[in-house]
Image (cartoon, rainbow, N blue to C red):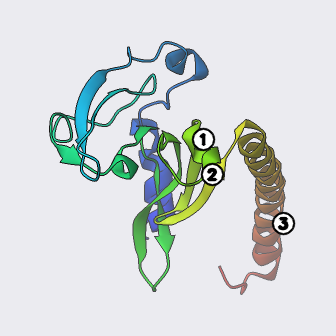
Amino acid sequence: MAQSAISKHIAALAAIPAQPTAADMSQPAEPRTWTFTDRVTGEKFTYTCMPGCTINHQQDAERSIFREDVWCWFWDESLTLPVNASGEPEEFRVLDTVIKVEPWSQKVAERLPFAVIELVDDHFIDGLDPDGLETVISTLAARVERMRETHRRLVEVRAQYKEQAARNEGGAL
């Protein structure tokens, strides 16, 4: 019998590198400082990245750009799962979390670091402050606990179903 895509994915989970822990993130890379010219005013700006920024700003440095196009982020390692959205399982990124800052954003809240969660490829929860991120984490943790309950129930139901099928000898298995 062929393995399902989810079974193959679960079997491959052992090869997924561990996600960075809070301890890993507590010592971010030293902030980088670089200079650019504001395309509108011609004024030179020296900008220091957010600690831990993973963007390579080299192509923006020393050239003319819009200030609004300057941002920093820390994008964690991606996790993918086989999602069946169109009849065939396809690997989609799930639960990617980004810490981002847009220092010249029109939204004042984005001028301080905030979190963005990519639920599934290109579907985001944006603009999360620490309390908002904690709310999402708590909601997902509660859902994971419900999934664990469903797992326990699935194990029980399968065992009962197999016993029932064995008693009926002609059972559909």
Q: Tell me, yes or no, whether the two marked residues, 1 and 3, touch with CB atoms within 8 Å.
A: no
Amino acid type of the residue that numbered disc 1 sits on in the rendered structure: Phe
Q: Tell me, yes or no, whether the two marked residues, 1 and 2, touch with CB atoms within 8 Å.
A: yes
Q: In the image shown, does 71 or 8 lie closer to the viewer?
A: 71
Q: Reading the chain from its start, which is encountered first: label 2 or label 3?
A: 2
Q: Residues within 10 Å of mark 3 (few under 14, many from 20)?
A: few
- Residue at point 32%, 20% (across, down): 32
Q: Tell me, yes or no, whether the two marked residues, 2 and 3, touch with CB atoms within 8 Å.
A: no
Instruction: Assign a secondary structure to mark 1.
Output: strand
Q: Residues within 10 Å of mark 1 (few under 14, many from 20)?
A: many
Q: Which residue is mark 2?
A: 127
Nearest to viewer (mark 1 / mark 3) = 1
Q: Which mark is residue 160?
A: 3
- Residue at point 15%, 34% (across, down): 62
Say whether residue 75 is visible. Answer: no
Q: Which mark is residue 114?
A: 1
Provide residue 116's location: percent of width, then percent of height. Answer: 57, 49
Q: Distance between the Cα atoms at labels 2 and 3?
A: 47 Å
Q: Reading the chain from its start, which is encountered first: label 1 or label 2?
A: 1
Amino acid type of the residue that numbered disc 2 sits on in the rendered structure: Gly
Report whether 82 appears left or right of 140.
left
Amino acid type of the residue that numbered disc 3 sits on in the rendered structure: Gln
Q: Distance between the Cα atoms at labels 1 and 2?
A: 6 Å
Q: In the image shown, does 7 or 171 lie closer to the viewer?
A: 7
Instruction: Assign a secondary structure to mark 2.
Output: strand
Provide residue 88's location: percent of width, then percent of height. Answer: 41, 80
- In this rendering, the answer to whether 30 lies above or below 142 is above
Provide residue 99's location: percent of width, then percent of height. Answer: 53, 38
